[in-house]
Image (spheres, coloured by chain):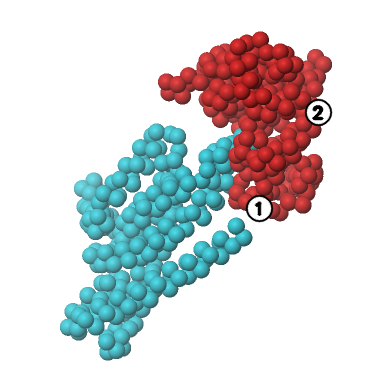
Amino acid sequence: MIKENGKVMVHVENLKKSFDKLEVLKDISIDIKEGEVVVLLGPSGSGKSTFLRCINRLEEATSGKIVVDEMDITDKHTDINKAREDIGMVFQHFNLFNNKNVIDNIMLAPVELKKMSKEDAKAKAMALLDRVGLSDKADAYPSQLSGGQKQRVAIARALAMNPNVILFDEPTSALDPEMVGEVLDVMKELAEGGMTMIVVTHEIGFAREVADRIVFVDGGYIVEQGTPDEVINNPKEKRTIDFLNKVL
Amino acid sequence: MIQVVQNYGLMIVAALGQTLLLCLLSLCIAMIIGLIVALFNVSHNRALNFVGTVFVDAIRGVPLIVLAYFIYFGVPAGMKAMGAVDFRLTALQAGTAALSMNCGAYMAEIIRAGIQSVDRGQMEASRSLGLSYGQSMRLIVLPQAIKTMIPSIINQYIITLKDTSILSVIGFPELTNVGKTIMGNTFRPLEAWAVIAIVYLVVIVSLSKGSHAMERKLNVGR
């Protein structure tokens, strides 16, 4: 749900990223608007996850410019910790804090970063758990949860900081098939609520249904982009067609 | 043997106290040294990596007995040469320094391995929420690392307790030193060393049993 006259939330300009001699991102430029849901598709090794990780500087861009909500992520003088407070991230392997129970996982950042008092953070965490359907798991440890439950907690944890944008790095790839639905449902609800989302996924059905824009990435470039109807149903580029033939 | 215990019991108890004092002091300092050096070694700062690596290599490359001699005799001599005539080290000070550095170097490696055993995703998730490297280390990574480190740390503590005996060479009045005294006074080496060995054995075995019980307690509920 893109806002009318919405501002640009994520601006990426000529982004390049190399690991030693391996050039993963060759030249990526894209503007993502507030409230927009962008799904990145592409074969494995095409650089989708690397692109996502550059946006919150988990990977340092080799060159180019990334601006998120007017904060220049690629500028060395930017307080990256401050910038990250507003950029949520959900990981393929959940990465819940194993030494904390569910409620503490969610409360940790808001309390440590002095965004909220303990009481407020707890109330907010409980509300978020309710939203992802896990109120009864507040005291459980991550090791006691199923994959789908872990990922829903991870989404709640990201939401606790009230981020402006959330990055999803293959959020359902490590799940058993029967748990994919519950996570996608939560993401769908978020999208409908107007959250700006950048999602790397192989769930074509989700992309078709929820995305405002599909971006097909291959070989470190954006090959093709457009609405789900344009890219999934009527792809123009040969590489997109080949990819879709394999996954559909 | 009973005679040895009767005549020298008090002396042995006092020596045991000295041994435990030296060990406890050294372990506390070693823990701090080990943590700092380990953090140096896992950081992404090359200068810190270098300092940490040199420390660990240097200490592990020098026998404890040589290190003890160096600190006890060498350092005051060096200070004298530089003009600090009154500089002296007691056997306890020199012994604590030598043992802390020695144990600290091994502890650093244990802690480094522990930190590296924690999945990288834990640090990434914490950083992605906006927490600093230091906060992430303190709140997320170290608490998880400690659990995997406990058996190795207990092992290192026991080694350090036994290593206090080496400091008898700089005249520190710990158990082994007292063993030498008893042997010299009584001409009964078999009994003297049997008693000393039993004291070490009892202390170390009870400490390690106690630590294992604590370890089990810490693992409850996980």
User: How many callouts does the rendering have?
Assistant: 2
**Left or right, residue B148 beside residue A127:** left
Give the colour chain B carries in the figure. Answer: cyan
Asked if one can make out residue B16 in the rendered structure from this viewpoint, the answer is yes
Who's the residue at 73% across and 27% down the image? Answer: A205
Q: Is residue B24 above or below residue A189?
A: below
Q: Secondary structure at mark 2?
A: helix
Q: Residue B21: x, y in percent?
A: 39, 67
Residue A144 marker? 1
The residues tagged by marks 1 and 2 sit, at their Cα atoms, a distance apart of 30 Å
Q: Residues within 10 Å of mark 2 (few under 14, many from 20)?
A: some
Dot 2: chain letter: A
* Residue at 73 percent of width and 37 percent of height: A181
Residue A153 sits in which quadrant? top right
Q: Which mark is residue A192?
A: 2
Whether residue B169 is situated above or below residue A171 in the rendered picture? below
